[in-house]
């Protein structure tokens, strides 16, 4: 992995790690489906007037918008609205690191070597440790439906990864490079309408109007952060990495997100960190190193 891509990975992990705390803050003043809708409304406007349509078929733009904006974030935001803590949400979402390579093997014919499989298994153990420590005695106070929705979110995320990869590969076959920033901007046109419809179904119109007309500064900050930092910049970086490396190489990167998420949740939301959580972090890092040994060796050679 090149130096600039390692730096992009660090920025990505930071943006998406803080993202969970920001979502919790935003949900205090805005209903979940409405928050998703506003997030993507600002993602596409006014950027769509300055960014050209991506060189891919419309169906990939639509499918990408549906899987990420509607599927992943509708499930995740609603789960957090129902009571899933930010730290737990950040951990469970990383299941995509194991679903994505599996989907890549099925749909993209990518292969996993034994080192990567070992690293994934070790990292999975670390995720389990963090999840156990994060839930603790409070697990019975979180609705089962909230866990069901948060478990569905990484499936949609992994699906969007495959769609982005297929679109990128098809563009490459034509001698073109898919502009993934434009993919994020144009696919952002998809979620606002279905999300607002869901918002009106799940909440009374009076509730939606009240949230709009009485929105506070924290909610405004949350919407701006989610639209520009987490979506435009974050998914732009993620999509660039998807286009540059095999799924098996980059899918473990988001496993670092819970570290940032739990730290930011501790500072801002007063969510507690335990020794078991720190142990889980170390296990995850160990798995990442094992899974990416070849990448790290290439990086070392580039610096010699």
Image: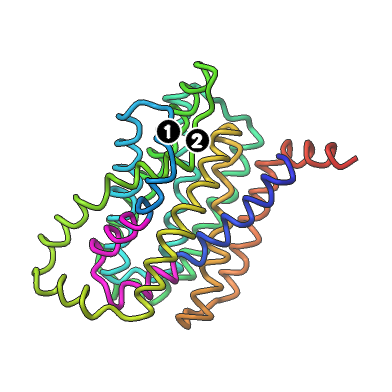
x 46%, y 38%: residue = 100
Which element is circle 2 on?
loop
Residue range corresponding to the magenta coloring: 20-42
* Front-most of residues 96 and 204: 204
Q: Is residue 171 above or below residue 26?
A: above
Q: Which mark is residue 54?
A: 1
Q: Residue furthest front?
A: 49
Question: Is 74 part of what is drawn in magenta?
Answer: no
Decide: few, some or many residues near mark 1? Use Cα within 10 Å; few <14, some 14-19, many ≥20.
many
- Where's residue 259, x and y in %? 57, 65
Quadrant that contains the C terminus? top right
Which element is circle 1 on?
loop
- Where's residue 151, x and y in %? 34, 53
* Front-most of residues 29 and 87: 29
Q: Is residue 55 above or below residue 186?
A: above
Does residue 182 appear to the left or right of 294 in the view shown? Answer: left
Q: Which residue is mark 2?
A: 179
Q: CA distance from mark 1 to mark 2?
A: 6 Å
Quadrant that contains the N terminus? top right
- Where's residue 81, x and y in %? 28, 69
* Front-most of residues 49 and 128: 49
Q: Which mark is residue 108?
A: none
Decide: few, some or many residues near mark 2? Use Cα within 10 Å; few <14, some 14-19, many ≥20.
many
Q: Main secondary structure of the magenta part?
A: helix
Place residue 204 in its image quadrant.
bottom left
Report the label total. 2
x 42%, y 24%: residue = 107
x 29%, y 55%: residue = 75
Sequence-first tag of 1 and 2 = 1
Question: Is 28 part of what is drawn in magenta?
Answer: yes
Is disc 1 in contact with disc 2, using a CB cutoff of under 8 Å? Answer: yes
């Amino acid at each position: 992995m090149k130096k600039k891509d390692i730096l992009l990975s660090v920025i990505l992990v930071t943006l998406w790690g803080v993202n969970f705390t920001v979502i919790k803050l935003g949900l205090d003043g805005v209903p979940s489906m409405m928050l998703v809708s506003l997030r993507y409304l600002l993602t596409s406007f006014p950027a769509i007037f300055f960014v050209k349509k991506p060189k891919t078929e419309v169906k990939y733009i639509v499918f990408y918008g549906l899987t990420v904006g509607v599927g992943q974030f509708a499930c995740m935001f609603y789960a957090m609205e129902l009571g899933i803590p930010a730290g737990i949400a950040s951990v469970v979402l990383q299941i995509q690191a194991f679903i994505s390579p599996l989907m890549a093997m099925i749909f993209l014919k990518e292969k996993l070597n034994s080192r990567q499989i070992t690293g994934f298994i070790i990292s999975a153990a670390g995720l389990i440790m963090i999840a156990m420590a994060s839930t603790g005695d409070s697990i019975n106070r979180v609705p089962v439906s909230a866990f069901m929705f948060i478990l569905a979110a990484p499936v949609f995320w992994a699906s969007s990864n495959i769609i982005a990869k297929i679109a990128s590969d098809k563009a490459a076959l034509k001698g073109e490079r898919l502009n993934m920033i434009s993919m994020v901007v144009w696919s952002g046109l998809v979620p606002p309408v279905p999300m607002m419809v869901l918002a009106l179904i799940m909440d009374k119109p009076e509730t939606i109007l009240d949230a709009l007309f009485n929105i506070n500064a924290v909610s405004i900050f949350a919407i701006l952060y989610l639209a520009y930092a987490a979506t435009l910049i974050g998914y732009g970086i993620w999509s660039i990495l998807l286009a540059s490396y095999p799924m098996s190489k980059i899918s473990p990167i988001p496993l670092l997100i819970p570290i940032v998420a739990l730290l930011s949740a501790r500072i801002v939301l007063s969510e507690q960190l335990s020794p078991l959580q720190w142990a889980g972090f170390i296990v995850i890092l160990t798995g990442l190193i094992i899974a990416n040994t070849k990448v790290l060796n290439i990086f070392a050679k580039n610096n010699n």
